[in-house]
Image (spheres, helix red, strand yellow):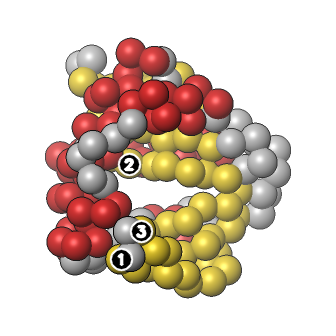
Amino acid sequence: MEIRRYQQADCQAVAELFYKTVHTVNAGDYTKAQLAVWATGEPDLKQWDQSLQSHFSVVALENDNLIGFGDIDQAGYLDRLFVHADYQRRGVATAICHQLEQAVACRVVTHASITARPFFESRGYQVIREQQVARQGVLLTNFVMEKNR
């Protein structure tokens, strides 16, 4: 597995991996309606690229295939961390998360899905609060989590 900085050419593959991961890996913890508003399948690639370019963003590759990605901003907000369904529990998220955490010198905060909460807890993150996020009138549960450094 290779981890490298995100490049604009990765954007389409990142958006596709995000959609597929949400609709497979997270399907056990969220309803179809929730999944549909979380990952619509119609991403604004320009907006995604701008966001990923403005953060410290990395991708994980195996044999030149994108298998995961993540990003963190300068304030320590870990925005996204997604791994392809076929590569779950193989250390991909751990390797990406390590890179992201090392990129900032401050505490790290994330909004973890129900699915991701145990992963972040295993890395020393503490739940600050559970919250309901509304997307197109549909509520999604996630957890504000923090890791002090």
Q: CA distance from mark 3 to mark 1?
A: 5 Å
Q: CA distance from mark 3 to mark 2?
A: 19 Å
The reply to whether discs 3 and 1 touch (Cβ–Cβ < 8 Å) is: yes
Is residue 19 positioned above or below 132 on the image? above
Please name the amino acid that badge 1 sits on. Answer: Val
Considering depth in this image, is 38 or 6 the residue closer to the camera? 38
Describe residue 59's horizontal placement relative to residue 104 as left or right: left
Q: Which structural element holds mark 2?
A: strand
Q: Position of residue 76 (x, y in %)?
A: 73, 50
Which residue is under mark 1?
A: 138
Q: Position of residue 27 (x, y in %)?
A: 20, 68
Which residue is under mark 2?
A: 82
> Does the image show residue 114?
no
Q: Residues within 10 Å of mark 2 (few under 14, many from 20)?
A: many
Q: Which structural element holds mark 1?
A: strand
Please name the amino acid that badge 2 sits on. Answer: Phe
Q: Position of residue 81 (x, y in %)?
A: 46, 49
Is residue 135 positioned above or below 99 on the image? below
Q: Which structural element holds mark 3?
A: strand
The reply to whether discs 1 and 2 touch (Cβ–Cβ < 8 Å) is: no
Q: CA distance from mark 1 to mark 2?
A: 22 Å
Residue 135's mark? 3
Is residue 61 positioned above or below 88 on the image? above
Determine the residue positioned at 56% across, 35% down. 51
Describe residue 110's horizontal placement relative to residue 76 as left or right: left
